[in-house]
Amino acid sequence: MARHEMDAPPGIYGLMAEFPDPTSLIMATRRTHEEGYRNIDAYSPFPIHELVEAFHAHDHRVQRNVLVGGLLGMFSGFGLCYWVSAIAYPLNIGGRPFNSWPAFIPVTFELTILFASFAAVLSWILLSGLPMPYHPVFNVPRFAEIASEKGFFLTIESTDPKFDRRRTEDFLKGLGAREINEIAH
């Protein structure tokens, strides 16, 4: 059993710290990442773009999946048009060649957009962990009360390799947290 698994009480999801304002949350997130914690998350009632940099979150999986979906749609659209016009039902219309690619552009474009859109939505849903009907952070009453209105929260999950119940709590206190709560599963 790993050391951090022995230190975390059973049934604990992690620790949640509340901060008074967005600037404090950003600074705390930066310091937490610099300290070596990686299984962290931040919550605020509005988007804070600096948090992406504070997390060093540069996940490009959705963009890659959209590119792959678009390319798959492009090749499918062009391939379908080519197969229909040149192989399955070749018709000589006005003396043009069977592989008249300018006529294939609208179908190719539409299937590119369609497949890329499906890839974007499916990637976003699956990589976001949805559907998730319930999240343990709602077990903290303070979070449930003010998170969507005026709360700025940082969580460190107990699955983090660096998580130690006492040291992590002391670390969060040192960041200037207003309140620290244990998150039960």
Image: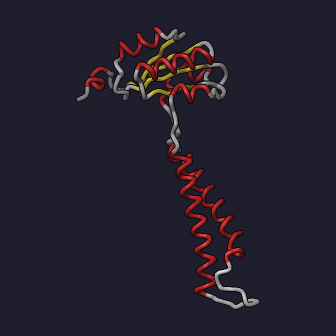
Q: Which residue is the extreme one toward the right?
A: 94
Q: Which residue is the extreme one toward the left?
A: 1
Q: Is residue 128 above or below residue 54?
A: below
Q: Nearer the viewer, residue 121 or 78?
A: 78
Looking at the picture, how far across and down is residue 34, in whole percent? 44, 20
**Left or right, 15 with reference to 46:** left
Q: Nearer the viewer, residue 58 or 126?
A: 58
Looking at the picture, how far across and down is residue 121, in whole percent? 59, 50
Q: Is residue 31 above or below residue 120?
A: above
Q: Residue at x 48, y 17 (%)?
A: 31
**Left or right, 133 with reference to 13:** right
Q: Quadrant of the N terminus?
A: top left
Q: Quadrant of residue 37?
A: top left
Q: Residue at x 48, y 20 (%)?
A: 16
Q: Say how the picture is coloured.
A: secondary structure
**Left or right, 105 with reference to 141:** right
Q: Is residue 20 above or below residue 140?
A: above
Q: Quadrant of residue 89?
A: bottom right
Looking at the picture, how far across and down is residue 173, in whole percent? 46, 9
- Total labels: the figure holds 0
Q: Quadrant of the C terminus?
A: top left
Q: Quadrant of residue 144?
A: top right
Q: Residue at x 53, y 50 (%)?
A: 64
Looking at the picture, how far across and down is residue 21, in whole percent? 63, 15
Q: Residue at x 59, y 87 (%)?
A: 88
Q: Nearer the viewer, residue 129 or 88?
A: 88
